[in-house]
Image (tube, grey):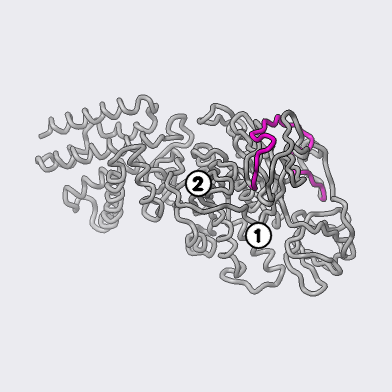
Amino acid sequence: MSQTTTPDTESDGVIESVSGPVVTAVDLDARMNDVVYVGDEGLMGEVIEIEGNLTTIQVYEETSDVAPGEPVANTGEPLSVDLGPGMLDSIYDGVQRPLDVLEEEMGAFLDRGVDAPGIDLERTWEFTPEVSEGDEVAAGDVVGTVPETESIEHRVLVPPYSEGGEVVAVESGNFTVDEPIVELDTGEEITMHQEWPVREARPTVEKETPTTPLVSGQRILDGLFPIAKGGTAAIPGPFGSGKTVTQHQLAKWADADIVVYVGCGERGNEMTEVIEDFPELEDPKTGKPLMARTSLIANTSNMPVAARESCVYTGITIAEYYRDMGYDVALMADSTSRWAEAMREISSRLEEMPGEEGYPAYLAARLSQFYERAGKFENINGTEGSISVIGAVSPPGGDFSEPVTQNTLRIVKCFWALDADLAERRHFPAINWNESYSLYRDQLDPWWRENVAEEYPEIRQWAIDTLDEEAELREIVQLVGKDALPDDQQLTLEIARYLREGWLQQNALHDVDTYCPPEKTYLMLTAIKHFNDEAFRALQAGVPVEEIADIDAAPRLNRIGTTPDDEAEAFVDDIAEEITAQLEEKF
């Protein structure tokens, strides 16, 4: 791919003033959301306000040394992304400039005013048609396929804005993305390259109710707070509580076809870790590199603030494109708080009336517009696809009452609350089971019954009730001590300890425990439930609580998670037999 710079445009206006990423221009003939090129260096920007002859632009690059009187050129087009083969296994910035391509040409530090297409316009792809001359095609139809990566077949679509028609010519072989591969009787030529405005959702027929879980392999999520394919979730938590690690685990292990990871304003070292780790990871589904089905958007905290505002839209537009092919897509946004802070900064420079804590009054509307593009959809070509959006939130000081967290809570249906106290006690994932919830649980129960176990919802409810009772008892213990509790309540605390330590805790760095299939998640729960049933039977037979808690078999419950999956069932059967035998000896 060759480096490109500012496209040919006429100098429509001149800069009047510069305030950080916000530039005002006069005599600029523009519409809202037009992309413009600012100054002598041609810095990319977007029109965000027009008042009389004064046009306000947010610039996606550093504006130091830009001065009044320099030219502003309008492209007349909204901010759009390039869609086509080549987006997977790529790393972009917030406006879809390929960082790996620019690094090859300029090194680690990128020059200002430099642009490059989001996909390689010179690379050839092997196109295999799925239509023949005489076939009728409509908007969204698949006309052929391209082997984009080792893992993903790229389905070439008729653009959504096409009027369709009869195929009069179709080619097979190797083509660049801009070469015509199908010609219609209307004269329209279809290529592998599409462009789409990032702030406009791609069309669908219908948004459907999701009924299949996005299995993540994380026991606390799959077991207690599941998210559906096509669902929305928020992971709020203070610094150091594990938001990014949880996002990484979801990106690595969630059973989505495509992963879009948006690093929005996070620290550079965290994004470096993602960029270095992902190419080394093996996809558990295919054995191929995980990057073969991943697109990364890296917009770190030291990059221009305005580009943060666009990066989540870039990510969701790429996700929608693969959804239109019939794929299930998981989008991780880390973190939406940094995105909101970018909106707050730009809003303050525009001197808009501030809302709560200085955030713009339209914060809730922007969050809604983003999360509502998630869902399970019937596409315009008749296929089904989904986008699951999981957004991390970084509330200052871990205060969940702040505006970004509260407005996100009103929108998403899954809330995974990270707890600094759990993190300090080295309990990971540090998700507080007393504050978290999932509104997808009931609609996903039929799937769990059919694919895991008929009694799964009931045994999960037992675990929830036990943990709830433990939370109440711990408050009493702080006042009067554990010994003041009746024997049955002391035993409940012991059972709940195994639920917390053996089931809810999970080691992301352990080769086996990093991923727990749903069947094993259920199996572990049945083992702890068996201990619960046998322990209460022994208690009723007069065995003291201390002796029940002291049996050798019970601590082995905490080792099921690190037992290889193919050995887990035999290991659990052995524990169950030992628990029963050791407790019966005490009768």
In x, y percent, where is residue 155? 63, 37
Of residue 501 and residue 317, the one placed in the foreground of this image is 317
- Image quadrant where residue 548 sits: top left
Secondary element at image label 2: loop
At x 45%, y 55%, the residue is 413
The answer to whether residue 306 is left or right of residue 382 is: right
In x, y percent, where is residue 89? 65, 36
Q: Which residue is mark 1?
A: 342
Is most of the magenta stretch helix, strand or loop?
loop
Front label number (2 vs 1)? 1
In x, y percent, where is residue 408? 51, 60
Q: Is residue 180 magenta?
A: no
Separation (CA) of disc 2 from disc 1? 23 Å
Most extreme residue toward the front is: 134
> What segment is highlighted magenta in the picture?
113-139
**In the rendered structure, which amino acid carries the disc numbered 2?**
Gly
At x 62%, y 32%, the residue is 279
The answer to whether residue 420 is left or right of residue 355 is: left
The reply to whether callout 2 and callout 1 are in contact (CB within 8 Å) is no
User: Tag 1 or tag 2, which sits nearer the N-term?
Assistant: 2
Of residue 552 and residue 76, the one placed in the foreground of this image is 76
| Vertical position of residue 334 compared to residue 577: above or below | below
In x, y percent, where is residue 297? 65, 45
The answer to whether residue 146 is left or right of residue 47 is: left
| Vertical position of residue 322 compared to residue 151: above or below | below
Q: Is residue 135 magenta?
A: yes
| Vertical position of residue 306 compared to residue 245: above or below | below
Residue 516 in view, yes or no: yes
Of residue 289 and residue 577, the one placed in the foreground of this image is 289
Q: Which residue is mark 2?
A: 242
**In the rendered structure, which amino acid carries the disc numbered 1?**
Ala
Quarter of the image with the C terminus in it: top left
